[in-house]
Amino acid sequence: MEKVNIVTQAQPWVDRFPLTGRYTYGVAGERFFRELKENGRFFGTRCTACDVVYVPPRLYCLRCFAPLEEWVEVPSTGTVHTFTVVHQDLDEAPLPTPEVIAFVQIDGCDGGLVHRLGEVAPEDVYIGMSVEAVLKPTAERQGGLTDIAYFRPTLR
Amino acid sequence: MTMEQWVYPSVYVKEDDFREGRVLYTTWQPRLFYAWDRGTAIGRFLAELKQGRIVGRRCRRCRRVVVPPRMFCEHCFRPNDEWVPLADTGTVITFSRCYITWDMRRLEHPQIPAVIAIDGASPGVGFLHHLGEVDPEAVHIGMKVKAVWKPADQREGAITDILYFKPMTE
Amino acid sequence: MGMRRVAIVGAGMTKFVRRALETGPELAWEAASRALASCDLRLSDIDGVVLGTAPDAFDAVHMKGEYLSDGAGAWRKPYIRTYVGGGTGVFSVIQGWYHVASGVFDTCLVVCEEKMSSHIPHPQGAFITIFDHILERPLGPNLLWIFAMEMNAYMNRYGLRKEDIAYVAVKNKRNAADHPAAMLGVRDITIKDVLDSPVLAWPVQRMDVSPIADGAVAVVLAADHVARRVTDKPVWIEGVGWNVDTTYWTNRDLSYPTYLEEAARMAYRMAGIKEPRKEIHVVEPYDPFDYKELHHLEGLLLADRGKAPEDAATGRFDRDNENHPDWLPSSPSGGLLGVGNPIAAAGLMKVAEIFWQLRGEAGDRQIPGNPKRGLAQAWGDLMQIGTVVILGV
Ligand SMILES: [Zn+2]
Ligand SMILES: [Zn+2]
């Protein structure tokens, strides 16, 4: 077999996959993002049998498979369950400012959202930190995760 | 008791529902750019195309000559043995007249993709290409065809160094 | 062989639609929860889960197995996603079968899902990724090319008439009019309608092709001792077979699916079937295109080579033509052409149809004469894989 030692001598075949996805949010997701967009509120679904509140809401309970029909409003506050500080973009170029990405567990729920943290220096973020959602103005909200601008430390 | 009750009535949305804001959605275009290695067999095949030649590989055990070339015989499951120069002529073993593009736009003049069994390879063995310089309605299975090459200085070592195959005139 | 008997004890599905609001996991749950309800089992009764779905690109979701797992009921259970191209829907049952036959599980939930509508403007953007990236994609192919060329090779080999092939589209779309999950059932369609539909890639016309769809289907498998406890009408998996031909599809004769014959012979052997044309009472061959149903009936040895179109024209494969001397109802569900083609889910729909037919639960589609044995088959990849399941009561 020919061995190519110098990368520039390799002759790759270059192409791309022309894929564009358009995703519906589903039966449960439609209602979740509709509430977020139009009323700035967070909702979850509750499974009474398993004593679980799903956020984002689900149509069914993954534990017991029951359909979930009980919708409950949940707070837009939560706790940093874990986080990372990102210093590079997808092409490994340095970001002008590092970004904090956190898994925010919504208060009183069994789930949460992965989102950006804002109005906080990366070195001040810690696991267990209380945070709250900062929503975009109503007119700018389009029905999607980015209707939440970011989470920030809860003002006390 | 029939199966009717075990069919879940899923929710049907129409294209208008997106346009008119009745259904929320998000879109995404993944950045799927790739640089694939050509490999030993196809690397050589493409290099030969650039020179205006078609080559295949022979397995001495089963005596098959295959194109596109590979470095092993999938029947005998052993390395195959040698490069074989093939002709740039062949026989149409099947074809279509295609009136749509990959993204479903309508074509006025059809493309004519065909599988061409290459002369010098084993019977029925060939590759996919286009037919050209031919009345689409006159194409038939068994038709003898010959490669039409790009000018030598425009070839780049690609399957498209052959522009298409055209009918051979006897 | 020291294997346990395995039965299908329940089945459920979603309606097939062009575009569902549901996410993939929601569709999977809708089908899976109906399948469990149909046999009065709960998720906690299930030992393991098999999920079948097409390439990730088709739903525009990567890691589809994991993405769909919650909806398929796999939370904290042994779980595997399986994939053999278009053959996946039937193969998923085979995978579930060997989980149970081997003694690893007593029960197995098998779920297939597809949400083809996620692609814009059209799933073709995903379909073309199946072509070789160096030697074929630079030619600007679309998915129809290969099927058009296979159909042409088949027609040319035997001198077949387009109208005899079109009869399959008519039959299946009519059959689908009685399927509650169907997206394209049409009771009054004619051969002329098919022959007059726009040419896409000759010889393939619009109505020769099944419509892309969103949907999910699920079945519940159980070992002998569990099956008898769960239902008084277990439908036994009597034979399975699968086989793949070379990926160098331009190096072989496309007019006959030899790989499918191999898969069928494997399944017939296991089921102890010597004369398939007598011993199979109802068949669901894979029909993404009308010619494929005929091609497959030949590969399954249920029709002579090149003769299936002629047989179809005599009404041999009609659902209610029991006076035909060689009657073999084919695609009583309406098939992919009529019910719709959410790839893996469509294959599993065929297995579910045989299940319902053998239990006498197919409603308006029920074929007369208490069928005792049926066969479901799927096909895919680069026109190279055959998957076969034989069911019996
Ligand atoms: Zn629950
Ligand atoms: Zn060999």
Image (spheres, coloured by chain):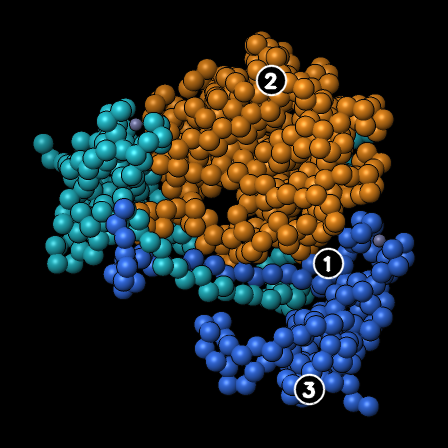
> Separation of disc 2 and disc 1 at Cα?
43 Å
Please tell me whether mark 3 or mark 1 is closer to you in this view: 3
Q: Mark 2 falls on what kind of element?
A: helix
How many numbered marks have been drawn onto this rendered protein structure? 3
Q: Quadrant of residue C144?
A: top left
- Chain that the image shows in cyan: B
B15 versus C378 height, above or below: below
Type of amino acid at the residue the image marks with label 1: Val
Give the image quadrant in which the ligand numbered 2 is located: top left
Image coordinates of residue C9 in percent, x first then y, are 77, 29
Please tell me whether mark 2 or mark 3 is closer to you in this view: 3
A139 versus C1 height, above or below: below
Residue indicated by mark 1: A27
Q: Nearer the viewer, residue A148 or C100?
A: C100
Chain of the residue that carries numbered disc 1 in the rendered image: A
Q: Tell me, what hue is chain A?
A: blue
Residue indicated by mark 2: C270
> Separation of disc 2 and disc 3 at Cα?
67 Å
Q: Residues within 10 Å of mark 1 (few under 14, many from 20)?
A: some
Q: Tell me, what hue is chain C?
A: orange
Residue indicated by mark 3: A124
Q: Is residue C393 left or right of residue C301?
A: right
